[in-house]
Image: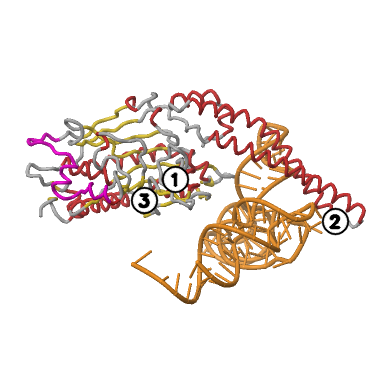
Amino acid sequence: MLDLKYVIANLEAVKKNCLDRNVPASVVEDLESAVAIEGERKGLFHRVEETRRRQNEVAQATGKERDAAKRGLLIDEGKQLKAAAAELEDQLKRLDAEIHERLRRVPNLTHPDAPIGPTEDLSKELRKVGVPRVFDFPVRDHVEIGKSLDLIDFETGGKVSGTGFYFLKNDAVLLELALQQFAMHRLIAAGFTPVITPDLARNSILEGIGFTPRGVETQVYSVEHTDLSLVGTAEITLGGMLADTVLDEGALPLKYVGLSHCFRTEAGAAGRASRGLYRVHQFTKVEMFAFTTPETSGEAHAGMLAIEEDLFQSLGIPYRVLDICSGDLGGPAYRKFDIEAWMPGRGTAGEYGEVTSTSDCTDYQARRLGIRYRPTGQKGTKLVHTLNGTALALSRALIVVLENYQRADGLVDVPDVLKPYVGKDVLGRR
RNA sequence: GGAGAGGUGGCUGAGUGGUCGAUAGCGACGGUUUGCUAAACCGUUAAACUGGGAAACCGGUUUCGGGGGUUCGAAUCCCCCCCUCUCCGCCA
């Protein structure tokens, strides 16, 4: 959520940003009416404060008053004030809720260097790293490899849980666990605190991070008869970890690496691009999350991207880096970099496919989650900045390893860095 | 799931209807003393929102787990919820 005072002072810029962000026109309407309501709310707010001030004054005077008649008068005034305050407060609450409801739909500001454009294809490719391997045999995609080596079983996944679910078997299990270990160890070495988070979270936390647990377009599963949803990413639980806290500046930056399962309804997604493990309802993810001061978030963001690149370089996977354009940033991100890894089995002759995403959310999430810090040597508190980034999304990491390391004989080589964790050099040998 | 006990400021812990944003201790910060350190002593020590002011600063509102209620007045009484602890049951 944006700061309403900032929005009022910079209304035109915020509106322009909404257009750049490719949000529905109704968001701009919401923005304007939020500002209009705020004018009304402010006046009401002062009336409420004045009423309460007099109420407190009367209550104190009543306690001190010994004369029964005077005391009676004070009590009468107190009763009137009480009724008046209740009415005004109700109105105030309504206005607050209306403003909040509208404001929360307004996306974060956009980094000045982020490419401006409405659709995905306007994101800017920053660099390509690594050269896609040339195969001297017919390339198979991970679905075929997974089936022939008995590593991934989508049929049984469908029978037991539905489309979009799968069973990992045999060496795929070792590969998945190896990738988790590999990523965790790298992140710990980079100074991140490892955490295994809950896979469910309260809806209020989801909302603070910027998810909408209820509503038609929701991407999350909610648990009936509870206030809980299955998390779509550990970003939710890691960010929620420090909700409503005030940190000392000296404690920042706080960097966590979380492991969780991720659940996504993927409403409305289908087709060739979502074949196999690419778009599934459940996967496991190693996720980075950081809390920083406003001054250091940009630097921390670059650091997360560097870690992501290091992971894929270490795995020997070609990739490209995208600076995501305004229209594709989503609500909370101020800037976002994606890594797309080379997937030889995708499309007709291989394609890059998204494997990581790292976002600088500035104070957008912190404002709603109530995460502040005390600047050293200064009075008061400020909002922290939050950042998140994928270390490894295991489902997509499996795709790139299986497809890039496939061999003419149908087996799959284990990338060197994973060998100690997998415990063997080749996958699929019986 | 059952029975009890609790949730108060950075921490520990007082406070059972009025002058309580809240005793005290610890910690932290500033100062005095000291060759240095320690000790001692003095002082300061929550946040959000908001009015005035160029600012220093001065006022107001809210906040004692969360939400509702009783009352002129609630940390204190009542109801619901959340969380923690102890015991019992169940259980990976």
Q: Are marks 2 and 3 on the same chain?
A: yes
Q: Is residue A226 left or right of residue A412?
A: right
Gap between marks 2 and 3, in whole Å?
58 Å
Residue stretch rendered in magenta on the structure = A133-159
Residue extending furthest toward the front: A159
Residue that badge 2 annotates: A64
- Please state, as top left, top right, bottom left or bottom right, where the C terminus of chain A lies in the image: bottom left
User: Is B20 or A349 nearer to us in this picture?
Assistant: A349
Residue that badge 1 annotates: A291
Q: Toward which corner of the image does residue A46 lie, by quadrant?
A: top right
Residue that badge 3 annotates: A258
* Chain under disc 3: A
Residue A201 location (% of width, % of height): 44, 51
Q: Residues within 10 Å of mark 3 (few under 14, many from 20)?
A: many
Q: Is residue A55 magenta?
A: no
- Name which residue lies at 15% across and 43% down: A405
Q: Residues within 10 Å of mark 2 (few under 14, many from 20)?
A: few
For discs 1 and 2, the disc positioned in front in the rendered view: 2
User: Is A159 or A61 nearer to us in this picture?
Assistant: A159
Name the amino acid, label 3.
Answer: Gly
Residue A208 location (% of width, % of height): 49, 43
